[in-house]
Image (cartoon, helix red, strand yellow):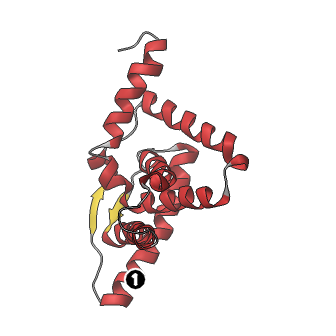
Amino acid sequence: MTHSVSLGMFLAGAAYLAWRLGRWWAGTAPGRRNWKQLVPLALGLSLSVIASACTGGLIGWIWHRAAQGQEQIGNAALAGGTGAHTVNAITSPQFGALDQWGAALLILLIAAIAGGWKKIKKPTLTDIKGGIWGGVGVGPLIGGYTLIPMINSLGLKTIGALFHVG
């Protein structure tokens, strides 16, 4: 499965993240901003960025469907809001994919979040979901050059070591 990232898709994800950061910034007094409040958003964003590198399977299919919906929203906002047209920025071969060790780490991360889902407070869940939404649009561009190689390497050094690989 090949993913592509359009300007509209990137816009939809980045706009949500900008909105969320703006609300966080404006909602706290200067000098009293609690950066820890952004951890759930960053967790959701990281999860989505990693999932963007899935080339198939259930996780890849879910991410691809979410990306298609987000692309339509972003393209409509771009055309309706400014009259501009979208462009395709990159395709998945350009931003890399998870190897088996990175994929194993992704599944463990999803399992950990799913295990605690019922115990996580609603505002935190909202931020995790928001990070996931934002990551669908910006994930391939951010993750392909930063997070995906790091996750693959970390997976090889941890899980791969259990199998005497690497």
Up-down: is 1 above or below 70? above
Residue drawn where x is 34% and y is 82% of the image: 78
- Of 87 and 138, nearer the camera is 138
Residue drawn where x is 50% and y is 37% of the image: 106
Q: Position of residue 68 (x, y in %)?
A: 47, 66
Image quarter where the C terminus lies is: top left
SS under mark 1: helix
* Res 112 → quadrant: top right
- Of 82 and 41, nearer the camera is 41
Name the amino acid type tagged 1. Answer: Ala
Left or right side of 86 for 80: right
Farthest right residue in view: 118
Question: Mark 1 sits on what residue?
Answer: 77
Up-down: is 41 above or below 93? below
Q: Position of residue 70 (x, y in %)?
A: 47, 69
Up-down: is 126 above or below 160? below
Left or right side of 82 for 123: right
